[in-house]
Image (tube, coloured by chain):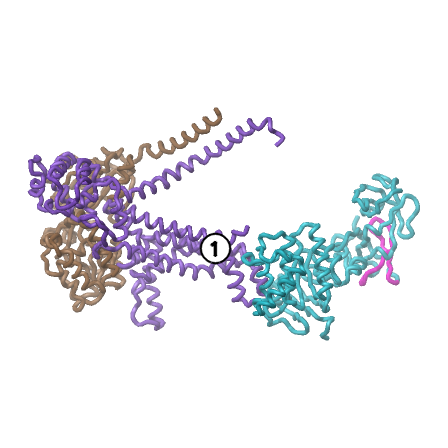
Chain colours: A purple, B cyan, C brown
Amino acid sequence: MAAGTVRAPAGRSRFRLRLGAWLLILPLFLFAAGTFVIPIGLMLVRSVQDPDFAAAFPRTAVALAAWDGRDLPPDATARTFLAELQAARGGDRISPAATRLNADLAGFRSLLLRTARNARAVGEDGLGTLAAIDARWAEPGLWAAMRRAAGPLTDYFLLAAIDLQRTDDGSIAAMPETRAVFVDVFIRTLWIGFVVTAFCLVLGYPVAYLIANAPARWANLLLVVVLIPFWTSVLVRTTAWVVLLQRDGLVNGLLRWSGIVEQPLALIYNRTGVLVAMVHVLLPLMILPLYSVMKGIGPSPMRAAMSLGARPLEAFARVYLPQTRAGIAAGALLVYISAIGYYVTPELVGGGGDQMISYFIAFYTNRTLNWGLAAALSLILLLATGLLYLAYARIEVRPEAGK
Amino acid sequence: MDGPDRFVSFDRVSKRYGAAVWAVRDLDLTVAKGEFVTFLGPSGSGKTTSLMMLAGFEQPTGGEIRLDGRSLRDVPPYRRDIGMVFQNYALFPHMTVAENIAFPLTVRRQPRAEVEAAVRRALDLVRLGGMAERRPAQLSGGQQQRVALARALVFNPPLVLMDEPLGALDRQLREQMQIEIKHLHERLGLTLIYVTHDQGEALTMSDRVAVFRDGGLQQLAPPLELYERPASSFVAQFVGDSNQFAGRVVRVDDGLCLVELDGGWRVTAAAAGGIAAGARTTLSIRPERVIVSDAGDPPENAGPAVVEELIYHGDHVRAHLATPTGQALFAKVLSGTGHGWLRAGAPVRIGWQARDCRALDPLPDHAGQEQ
Amino acid sequence: MAHFSKLAAMALAMAGMAVATAASARDLTVVAWGGSTQAAQKKVYYGPFSSQTGIPVLEDSWSGGVGILRAKVQAGQPNWDVIQVESDELHIGCDEGLYEKPDWAALGGKDAFMKDAVSECGVGSVVWSVALAYDADRLKEGPKSWADFWNVQQFPGKRTMRRGPKYNLEFALMADGVPAADVYKVLRAPGGADRAFAKLEQLKPHIVWWTAGGQPGQLMASGEVSMAASYTSRMFAARRDDKRNFQVVWAGSIYAVDHWVVLRGSPNRDKAMQMVQFMTRPDIQKELPPLSFQGATNLEAAKRTDPSVMSSLPTDPANLAVAAPLDVEFWVDNIEQLTQRFNAWASR
């Protein structure tokens, strides 16, 4: 503080140093922003944006937004639509619009594209011209679906992601039973995540304890064994499980040979297979944080507790277990969050009722280009993950609170 | 056989790892009730292994350990009722100080009111009255040490073990805690076994010190005897400072012997057991017993020497000396006036009383004739 | 400050270099469906093309999804050039403008190809089928139709079908007595899908769902199932390679055409088109069916295909006569809602 006179230059050089440091991490920052934050942000924004129809039919969208939604729209709107349809024909914008309408009303895609191909001169009777091309244009539901897609913002995708929809008159109602699938899938996803986490904890805890307390030579070997599933491709692992668990597989063979069962058990292509394979894959994520916490505890707390008169079980429950809580929380969080994002494993070894939410996210992103719905499902999954993390942070902050 | 003198006994106790690694070999040792015994030795000497076998965390591969006449062979650690203080304290980080201290009582299912009273007494005993609700991480090293002490004492164990409990503390705190532990031992009449590799600590605190080396007991004796009459050159070297000279025994005569040091200087020394004429030996003399004078000869074992270096230590001066016959030694000279003649390069006369110097078993590098 | 501008310039230059490297000239990249069929393509197409033209070819594989193609085109500078797509990806991608248009005159004219192979945006690559298959070593008296597939009394054992609504709704209707030619008419009509799902419901406890094309063969080989709705090419490959006695029932099979497309904005557009022309030449394409058990799209190639494998191909006239073509438009329109319905139904 004696250097008051040199403070200004010192301050400037400190600023320079700091700026230099920032410039050094700039590439990493740009990389993270460019490959992670921005794409995810853009994707999530799509869950409330509805730009596709308005991009191809801007004036129709405005006219439909002004329409009261009852019966059929004014004929002028239909004529505007016809004119824009002809203009859009052959362009790149009509397909995303058709995809968007088709998501709401199956068959709309081909209807729109066919109508665009067949639309000729616009007469005085817009609705009539359209109905002549395809009779469905006389159905009010078609126009209501277009009005719902007029954008620019929408709650359509978010509602659909929780099995709700807006009816033609604008009120919110449940999806028909044949399409209501996501609430079940979310519950299933969270439940499978929970069961997998529980199994990983029960199986991983003793293993982590063993490794943490084994001589270094054995511990390293065991760690490698634990990590092998991590380094193996998903397909190889899955194939291995198929070989083990199938009807005439090794496990069933042993069970039947030993006389435990007479008929082979269904161990794969159902929930059992999904759980076995996922637990196997995710176990290292539980073992590693537990191991690192246990490694720091060492044998002395257990010894101290026993020297003070606690039987091994009580010493474990009162002294050891509470000290591994941070590891349990971190492992459980890692496993759970990874588990609820899974889809390859359930896809390959699951049955009809074992698909998790990521399967649908991939399906809508990749197969049907319904990116709005994929974004809405992702948003809900991300929120669930975020809430979990907050809960974890609360648990983890508390023991340090006194510090 | 049994009795207060044999409250703890090790009877030919061995601990072997694998086929050939002996951590402890044929250990015989007893501790009397109320005694403060220190296990002293360098690392790997078997002292901690012996303590862990007594606590029940290691199983002897041979021999028998008894506590109060009862064999501990099949008694698990949690039924031995031995209070233990660990090297790193082993406090439970997720419990408060009070919960830590209450632990041995709550596992014994004592009534709540009694537990609270006992914890309060224990906290007062170690002078941590206001710290009950803190967590270990919020305490200083010395305070943590006291919590560990209180926790080991609160259930009134007949025997308390301490495994290098002060190793992590700085010197001042260490000395303060040494006194506190000593006072606790006296006040509570504890039987206490204390493990350390610090010989100063062992000498100041214990009733008796057991010096370990290579899995065996070198000497078990009160500090005074250990210092004054070490049984081996290892003990002489390990406990306190000493000068050591190689030589050969010329003759032994009624507890005294004549030794010819390498180089030809003949001196007399007290002979330890097993010293015979003609054998190689190591002479051990404490530096404060070396007499240095400017003119007059010391009464015994006098000879010439040259001051090589002087190191000032405040209360004393350490003088490094060399004799014409090749012995290098140092002497502690109480600092004071009138030592003007004592300066580097000055020729002096040195000597010592024969009973202050002991002829012991030869150190490994003193075993052969030196030229 | 000069110091910092230098640092900043360096950072920018490094970033620029990274971008430039990524965008620099890349070898012609062809993408197909992996596995043994792509291995066959490599032998018949990629290798000879490279050696005859001197153009190096990079290979990649994918498992479909027009979303990937859309993302690549929208990002600009796609890193794939020639892609084998299924007909729904051809259809949607064409509407989206994701593909470069082929020059049919250079390909030998539209008349040189079968009708389903000709489109504005791609050139048919192979014809493949999904059909009823069984292991004749396990079922002496084999099933003859989808109705038999549903008959678990006479033909015990589990069945395996592809998880999803596609093909299964068609097969269910055929099992329910709808002629192959009328399947999509019934499906489009009100109540058509209800009828198909009701029929599937009857068989549901006996179905093991497959997701990867190799699974039906494994499931039959391991005895897990007695019959499958499977890609026919896989069955014939298992007969040849693993000496399995798998039989295919062509009646009521559904066939579809895969297409070669060139991604819009491909920096290797001309080489890509040259390669598509090469791969659809009669003398080249005729070599593929004996290896992959998929049919040729070039009529001349089909004619010149090794006659010994002819009856194993979807393009055999006898097989085509009893099969139904996949209705791409129906599935593009309905895949989303029927998939939701299928999953709601399958998990009940």
The magenta stretch is B254-274
What residue is shown at x 6% (from left), y 36% (from top)?
A124
Q: Residue C253's image quarter?
A: bottom left
**Residue B78 image position (x, y, % from top left):** 59, 68
Residue projecting furthest to the front: A68
- Drawn side of residue A148 relative to residue B156, left or right: left
Location of mark 1 (residue):
A327
Does residue B110 appear left or right of residue B245 in this picture? Answer: left
Q: Position of residue A183 (x, y in %)?
A: 28, 55
- Host chain of mark 1: A
Answer with the quarter of the image where residue A66 lies. Answer: top left
Which residue in the rendered view is the most extreme toward the bottom?
B1
- Magenta span contains residue B260: yes
Question: Which SS class for mark 1?
Answer: helix
For the residue pair C7 and C131, the one nearer the viewer reads as C7
Task: Determine whether, in the image, residue B54 is placed left or right of residue C343.
Answer: right
* In front of the other: C325 or A205: A205
Residue type (three-letter) at the residue carrying disc 1: Gly
**Vertical side of A137 occupied by B189: above or below:** below
* Residue C277 visible, this orientation: no
Q: Is residue B366 above or below residue A83?
A: below
Query: Residue placed at 37% from the left, 41% from the top?
Result: A37
Image coords of residue C198 (percent x, y) = 16, 61
The x, y position of residue B35, in whole percent, is 73, 66
Q: Quadrant of the N terminus of chain A?
A: top right
* Rendered residue at 18%/56% (across/down): C168
Camera sees residue B202: yes
